[in-house]
Image (cartoon, rainbow, N blue to C red):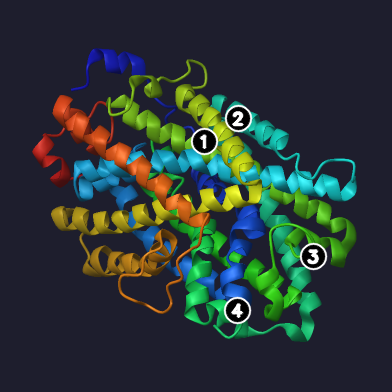
Amino acid sequence: MATETTRRAAGSLHNDAIGLREVLFQSVTDMAPAAAVAASIPAGAAFAGGALPLSVLVALVACLLSAFCIGELARHIPAAGSLGTYVARGLHQSLGFLVAWAYVAIGVLIPPLVLLQLGFTTASTIHGEWSAYPAGLWWPWTIVGALIVVAAGLFGVRASAVFGTILGLFEVLVLVVLGVLLIVHAGHANTIKVFGTSYAPSAHAGWGGVIGGSVFTILAFGGFEGATPLAEEARDPRRTIRRAVIGAVLVVGIFYVFTTYAIDVAFGPGKFATFTSSGAASWEGVARTLYGFFWWFVFAAIVNSTIANSNAGVNVASRTAFAMGRIGAFPHGFARVSTRHRAPYIGILATGIVTIAVSLWLGFQYNPTVAFSIVGTALVIMLVSIYIVCNAACIGYFLRNRSAGFNPFSHVLIPLLGIAAFVPAWLSAVGVNPFGWSFISPLAAPLSYAIRGVGVWMVLGVIYLVVLYVRAPRRVADVARIHLDEEPLPTAEAATVTS
């Protein structure tokens, strides 16, 4: 059992506080649809060119397979520890710990990613309208964004989730309307050839460009599992979380395919490799050129999306840290919740501090757009790694717990297909090609520096894991526990426990 000191420090989250709508939009806003359409997906245009819609489809299939596996695990293991707990029960508690370690970093890095975008998008837009404003003065907007999401998080999950739902609906509506207008504008230029490889740039011909582009389109889907850490605050979590995870991938995936196709055919597939996240060759620039005042709505949707995504990232990081602090695997302070709103305020405040530090450090070290791509690459490396491990955990969990409804198709074939679908993008992101595949295009510096940062973080995690095994092995085994009041699991048996 947990110690009385841990119990008193931990408190509890706000049970049954939110329903399917709020949980769904936690995953939706964790993907930041408008921000992804404006920056993450266009970052892949340099690789895939006019074939970028095919890269989006590749990412959609891979993420949908993984979402199904995560949804199956969420149905049996509703826990704030989410992916870490799933892997601990499906494979081994040590792997579960490392997944939780990486997942906290993912939640912490999401706000810097999109708040860097908030900074450079806002600064360039204001400069375009008022030349006296310095185009390089991006950092005040990043800091303001961080303060907003921290404040929203401290008001508790209900306020944070409603905030995310409102923001999510607005950004999707704006870009759907613009997408329809762009398809109409394209007229006879509409073509299904953009779902093939013929428009990939010569430097990244064929599937090499498509796979290279998929690194960034996968980044656009990153966060679809963001609902899972809210399991202890959601009503009927065994059904709600599963529906939210799978539903978010489907809804946002269709949105990504539609909007990427629309801007591709409107801008011109043959020159789409030059499409970027700002300036004339961007969503905002095209909207300004074709529809005048409508660009203000696009700008508002992008700003809105960055705030919503930051908000979702803070929720993920703070809840995962809460679950790890509750069992003593992280410092117990992370398990403290505020008396009034039951918000894990230590994790929320820590995420805010790291967000500002990482954004300013990388933004000034390079520039905010390069910093955005570096953070995005690091997120893809960790996210894809976790998705692959979670797919394997789905196989392990249901093979060990056949009474939970084992199905060879759902719990073996689909996870294996999910693993296979992610491997090319993962190899491209980490910069290795052990099989000599012609369609793998490793990323160049400085984006390739991301693997070093991820490597350092994971090495620290392994060292900490070894220390815990020596000093307090029970804390590692407890990663597999769903609730604080659940009986602790024997260290040697934590990976084989039934639901």
Kindly identify which residue carries mark 2.
152
Q: Earlier in the sequence, mark 2 or mark 3?
A: 2
Structural distance between the alpha carbons of marks 2 and 1: 10 Å
Discs 2/1, front: 1
Q: Earlier in the sequence, mark 1 or mark 3?
A: 3
Kindly identify which residue carries mark 1.
314
- Is 490 positioned to the left or the right of 358 in the image? left
Element type at marker 2? helix
Q: Quadrant of residue 100?
A: top left
Mark 2, other Cα within 10 Å: few <14 / some 14–19 / many ≥20: many
Residue 360 in sight from this viewpoint = yes
Residue 417 in the image: x percent, y percent?
32, 70
Mark 3, other Cα within 10 Å: few <14 / some 14–19 / many ≥20: some
Structural distance between the alpha carbons of marks 4 and 2: 43 Å
Element type at marker 4? loop
Element type at marker 3? helix
Give the amino acid at mark 1. Answer: Val
Give the amino acid at mark 4. Answer: Pro
